[in-house]
């Protein structure tokens, strides 16, 4: 059983709204106008990876954070 692959998959699919390292909610958002959905967003406080931009979008939609159109 490849545990490392499973962890990697989880990290890619689930965005950590709260940093596991420092507990901060701050996220360093990408500065590009058209950021790559696969780019990793980092904690705005300690810089540890929090998940991909795509994962953030998916998580936001699930949590109902998305702005109404
Ligand atoms: Zn952090």
Image (cartoon, grey):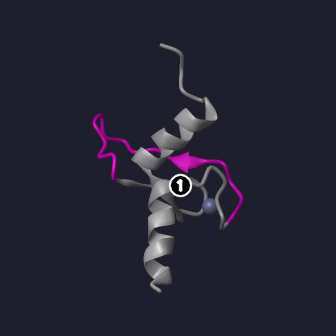
Principal secondary structure, stretch drawn in magenta: loop
Residue at x 49%, y 44% (from the top left corner): 56
The quarter holding residue 60 reads: top right
Residue 48 % position (x, y): 54, 65
Magenta residues span 22-38
Residue 8 % position (x, y): 45, 70
> Which residue reaches farthest bottom?
1
The quarter holding residue 12 reads: bottom left
Q: Which residue is mark 1?
A: 14
Local packing at callout 1 (Cα closer than 10 Å; few below 14, some 14-19, many 20+) is some
- Residue 18 in the magenta stretch? The answer is no
Residue at x 36%, y 42% (from the top left corner): 31
Q: Between residues 42 and 69, which one lies in front from this camera angle?
A: 69
Quadrant where ligand 1 appears: bottom right
> Which residue reaches farthest top?
69
Where is 12 relative to 35, above or below? below
Where is 47 relative to 2, above or below? above
Q: Secondary structure at mark 1?
A: loop
Q: Between residues 41 and 15, which one lies in front from this camera angle?
A: 15
Residue at x 47%, y 39% (from the top left corner): 57
Q: Is residue 67 left or right of residue 38?
A: right
> Which residue reaches farthest front?
1
Where is 30 relative to 46, above or below? above
Does any atom of ligand 1 lie closer than 8 Å to the CB of label 1? no
């Amino acid at each position: 059983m490849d545990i490392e692959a499973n962890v990697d998959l989880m990290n890619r699919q689930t965005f950590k709204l709260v940093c596991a390292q420092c507990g901060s909610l701050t996220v360093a958002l990408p500065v590009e106008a058209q950021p790559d959905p696969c780019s990793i967003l980092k904690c705005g406080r300690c810089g540890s990876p929090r998940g991909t931009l795509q994962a953030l979008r998916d998580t936001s939609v699930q949590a109902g954070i998305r702005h109404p159109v």
